Amino acid sequence: QVQLVESGGGLVQPGGSLRLSCVASGIIFRINAMGWYRQVPGDQRELVATITSGGSTNYAGSVKGRFTISRDNAKNTVYLQMNSLKPEDTAVYYCNAEVVVQPWSRQSDSWGQGTQVTVSS
C-alpha cells in the first residue's frame, strides 16, 4: 500500500508563487517517474510536469518557464515550484508516482488526494 500526500496549495494573487510538495510512503522498493497533474471541474485531468528518477523533466507548454519540478529521491518527495501564477492555473493539483513495491513487481500508478490551487485577486 502506497500513499501520496500533497501539501502547499492555497489562494494566491495573480503573479504570486506557491510551492507544492508530495511525499510518498508505504511499501516502496523504487519510484520511477513522478509528476504533477491538474484538473478543473468538467475538464479532463491534464499533465503539468513530470520528472524521472534521473532528473529528466517534461512540462506542459502552458507552464514552461514558470513552473519547476524537482524531487528528492532519498525522501520519496516531489516538488512543484509555481511562479508567475495566472488565474487559468486555478485547479486541483494531483501528485502521481510510478511505484515498484518489490524488486520483482511491475510498476503501478499511485495518486494523491489532490490540493486546491486558486489564483485570484
Image (cartoon, grey):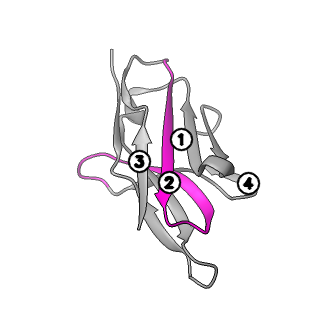
Question: Where residue 56 is drawn, which disc sits there?
Answer: 4
Circle 3 sits on which residue? Answer: 5
Task: Indicate which disc, 2 or 1, sits on the residue closer to the N terminus.
Answer: 2
- Res 61 seen here: no
Marks 2 and 3, how far apart at CA = 7 Å
State yes or no: residue 109 in magenta.
Answer: no
Question: Label 4 amino acid?
Answer: Ser
Compared across the picture, whether 79 is left or right of 52 comes to: left
Question: What residue do we see at 34% from left, 57% from top?
Answer: 44
Q: Residues within 10 Å of mark 4 (few under 14, many from 20)?
A: few
Circle 1 sits on which residue? Answer: 62
Residue 48 image offset from top left, x and y in percent: 51, 48
In this view, the residue farthest toward the left is 42
Span of residues in magenta: 16-43
Q: How many marks?
A: 4
Q: Is label 3 in contact with label 4 (beta carbons under 8 Å)? A: no
Q: Is residue 90 above or below residue 22?
A: above
